[in-house]
Amino acid sequence: MISLRPFLSFTFAALVVFSSAAWAADAPQPGGLDASPSLKTPTTPSAKLGPKGFLSRWLVLEPIPGDGRVVDSAVQAAARKEYFPDQFSVLPRAGDKVTVNGADYIWRAVDSNRHNVNLYHFAYFLGKPTSNVVFWGVTIVESPEEISGVRLAVGSNAGSVWWVNGQEAVGIYGDRQTSIDDGISHKLTLRKGPNIVRFIVVQNAGMVDCCARLLDATDQPLTGLTQTLTAFANR
């Protein structure tokens, strides 16, 4: 006869660990974002893109409660819902607040040391919920010249919608894993000077992250660009 005791003990221990992790995600974490293995607070006014062109510097809004649905229609509905005033045009500074349903949420400046922006780390190390939430992010990409034939290439876990200079560029949907260049936009023209890239990521449960880069007309990553947060003024 096979004993159930080892199995039950293991199941109980797993539940304890899972419950502890779920509680910890809502508790303030020592060190905040700078304790994260992937995210740091920026220390310079601008950052040049790396050799693979990934956008690593963002202002991300603390996660807002969502319904966790990631099918096409639900993600598009989330992208069109008004959470806070001027959400498609606001150029915040780090520390700015927005109010959603009576609760305040803070814009945080982050640099990622990986190709992706780990939004789970972002929420966890701020002691914020990591499930059934939506994340807003925005950055400015400075281009030394006008560049045509550009495409925005993105990946996310789970669904997401992305805008460039106020125009919807690409969306990907479903309960998916983040893959590099999973969704690629139609052809865009980058302006000389600042270009605004914005995203919303809709999360249900588990890991959540995203990545983005700009590709040239030959589908090679654009690297001669700079990301800056100093441009997030009342432009």
Image: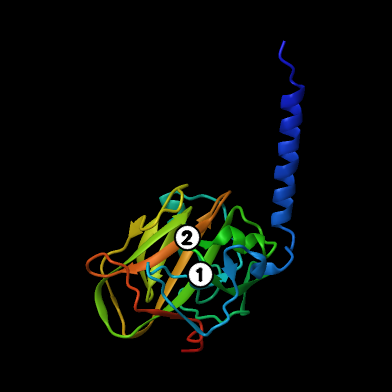
Report the residue at 76% width, 29% height from top.
Answer: 9
User: Do the residues bearing badges 1 and 2 touch, measured as CB atoms within 8 Å?
Assistant: yes
Mark 2: give few (<14), some (14-19) or many (20+) Cα within 10 Å: many
Number of numbered markers:
2
Question: Image quadrant of residue 225?
Answer: bottom left
Question: Image quadrant of residue 42?
Answer: bottom right
Which amino acid, by three-letter code, is at mark 1? Gly
Report the residue at 60% width, 74% height from top.
Answer: 108
Residue at the extreme top = 1
Residue 155 seen in the figure: yes
Q: State which mark lies toward you, 1 or 2.
A: 2
Q: Is residue 31 left or right of residue 116?
A: right
| Between 158 and 104, the one nearer to me in the picture | 158
Q: Secondary structure at mark 1?
A: strand
Which amino acid, by three-letter code, is at mark 2? Cys
Query: Which part of the image, by quadrant, shows the N terminus?
Result: top right
Residue at the extreme front = 51
Q: Is residue 176 left or right of residue 65?
A: left
Q: How is the image coloured?
A: rainbow
Q: How far apart in space, not on screen, are marks 1 and 2 (Cα)? A: 10 Å
- Residue 93, image x, y percentages: 56, 82
Q: Is residue 221 shown above or below 156?
A: below
| Between 126 and 161, the one nearer to me in the picture | 126
Mark 1: give few (<14), some (14-19) or many (20+) Cα within 10 Å: some
| Between 140 and 213, the one nearer to me in the picture | 213
- Residue where numbered disc 1 is placed: 137
Q: Secondary structure at mark 2?
A: strand
- Residue where numbered disc 2 is placed: 210
Q: Is residue 87 shown above or below 117?
A: below
Q: Is residue 141 left or right of residue 45?
A: left
Q: Which mark is residue 124?
A: none
